[in-house]
Amino acid sequence: MRKRILVINSGGDCPGMNAVIRAIVKRTDQETKTESDIEWEIIGSINAFDGILAEPLELIPLNSKTVTGIHVKGGTILMTNNKRNPFKYPVRQEDGSIKNEDVSDRLIYNLKVHGFDAVIHIGGNESHKISQQLYKKGVNIIGIPKTINNDLSVTDYTFGFQSAAETATEAVDKLTTTASSHNRVLILEVMGRNAGWIALHAAIAGGAGVCLIPEIPFSMDKIIEKLKTRYDRKGRGYAIIVVAEGAYPIGEKSDIVSGTISRKISAFLKNLKFEADIRETILGHLQRGGSPMAFDRILATELGVKAFELIKEKKFGTMAVHLNSEVTNIKIKKVIDKYNKIDLSGDLIQTARGVGISFGD
Ligand code: F6P
């Protein structure tokens, strides 16, 4: 008997997505070899939900040949997209305009006629809202959490995060050499959406003086206070400010458009005629790219294997997660709309404050 699993990844790419795809394929290969009565077939949907909705379908077989060695590669061999929600799917109209339509019934029909027994959906928070809606419509779906932001609740870490934090830390290290050579204040803007995990890890690991995160609205006066401690009477010194893209001043709102918050801080300091030269660096998509570090490869592999086990156990509507150092599962509905924000009374914040990092508060 043959059983088919469709693998779909959606949302932003992140290091580790290929590792999770490879793990799903290798685990099912093991099953086919040892449990002779079922032959498992893994198929990938190209460009998120496009592949299973396109006419003709755009699917690729995922087997030991197509996944060999991909675990070291960043990105995803399936391509991905963060604007392909099957419940609000962009459909070209006769007049050439694009209208978002609910095409979930067509998706479910295509899954049925092409004999898919289950779907593994790899995505972030927005993606798993879709997973839950499809589950409620009868799709045998398993979720796998991924995002560089680490903002998905009920999992210790999301794969992609540690690699992004490493990239951001390397950037702090590099900026420190030039800041100290020029007595400058250098501002590094990092990703993270509405959470400050990347910023906090990079600030502690890189030794920044200021770390601004969405969880703590900041005061520019407090930042100035901290910066002044970094310079002597001759104006010698330097400072690194790591700011999360979702951070915002007290009394204002988060504006997650790349470059906004770092330029706002830079302009404020320049208007104050702060004694040092100010420059800003927006790290952007460098945090999404590159080969996954070992931690993320291992986490991705664990979740890919677990996702298949959940299919075997018919635990549909659940997500493979790493929770309290255990690979386990949790109902998808418990994950969505619950963001993993930094605990302001937690050890990491206390550690940062303990080494003199200012949060602008
Ligand atoms: O969600 C991951 C993320 O990298 C965010 O941190 C960032 O704001 C966003 O995606 C960028 O999206 P895009 O790749 O569409 O520019």
Image: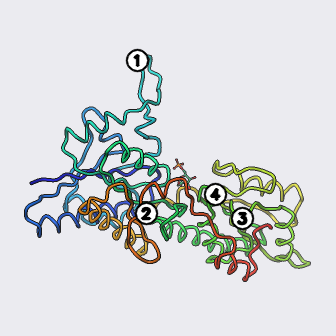
- Label 3, on which residue? 212
Comparing 117 with 149, the one in front is 117
Residue 119 position in % (x across, y down): 30, 51
What residue is rendered at 41% in x and 44% in y? 133
Classify mark 1 as within 8 Å of ligand 1 or not, answering yes or no: no
Along the horizontal axis of the image, is 316 left or right of 155? left
Along the horizontal axis of the image, is 73 left or right of 111? right
Compare marks 4 and 2 and give the one earlier in the sequence. Answer: 2
The amino acid beneath tag 4 is Ile
SS for dot 1:
loop
**Which numbered tag is attached to residue 253?**
none
Along the horizontal axis of the image, is 292 left or right of 70? right
What residue is rendered at 77% in x and 74% in y? 238
SS for dot 4:
strand
- Tag count in the figure? 4
SS for dot 2:
loop
* CA separation in Å, label 1 and label 3: 48 Å
* CA separation in Å, label 4 and label 3: 14 Å
